[in-house]
Image (cartoon, rainbow, N blue to C red):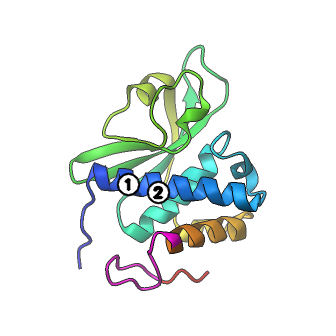
Amino acid sequence: MTSPTLTTTEIENYASRFSEILARLVKENGRPVSTLVFFPKGGCFNASRLFCAFRSEIRFTATQVTGDPIGKFTKSQHGWIVFDNSSGKGVIDLTCEQFDDCDLPCPFVSETSHWHDERWQIVERKLVSRKDLTNENLAEPELDYLNEILSEMGISKQSPEHGVSSLVR
């Protein structure tokens, strides 16, 4: 069975809800999951990794990217997501609001982004799945967040609507 292709609007809806739930969970639980404890500030890599693992549950193609700053900007790297959808490719940034020079809405979802193109040089692209999260040191807390997000969004074990596999680790 071929999975349906999501529109940018559908991806934006998933990203907004995902980000909203993650921010609330971090605030309520205060579990120190690397940089997510300050989400969205400084949480770009782990938030992007979680969303990429999440995207495999709702079945669209997304890749975590890492960018080095271009020119006079911060010396820190930044992480965000690129996706494929029904109209081509696009950008998802769950933490762009942490940068003073960024006036994009957060989370940001669009088919183009001049801010990303002009400010960041992509140095790495990585597909991230749930399996990747289980192979890393922070796997258990991140998977707990991911499972809670999926549950709150109504994406559950073997959901016929979404064709989602088991959420069990």
Element on which disc 2 rests: helix
Which quarter shows the C terminus?
bottom right
Residue at left 66%, top 39%? Answer: 41
Question: Which residues make up the magenta segment?
Answer: 152-165
Task: Find out whether residue 9 is within the magenta segment.
Answer: no
Q: Is residue 135 left or right of residue 14?
A: right
Give x and y (percent) for residue 135. 66, 69
Give x and y (percent) for residue 149. 54, 67
Q: Are marks 2 and 1 in contact (CB under 8 Å)?
A: yes
Give x and y (percent) for residue 164. 41, 78
Residue tagged 2: 17
Q: Mark 1 is on which residue type?
A: Asn
Whether residue 163 is situated above or below residue 30 in the rendered picture? below
Which quarter shows the N terminus?
bottom left
Whether residue 107 is situated above or below residue 102 in the rendered picture? below
The front one of 127 and 19 is 19
- Quadrant position of residue 40: top right
Q: Is residue 111 left or right of residue 149?
A: left
> How many numbered callouts?
2
- The circle on residue 13 is 1
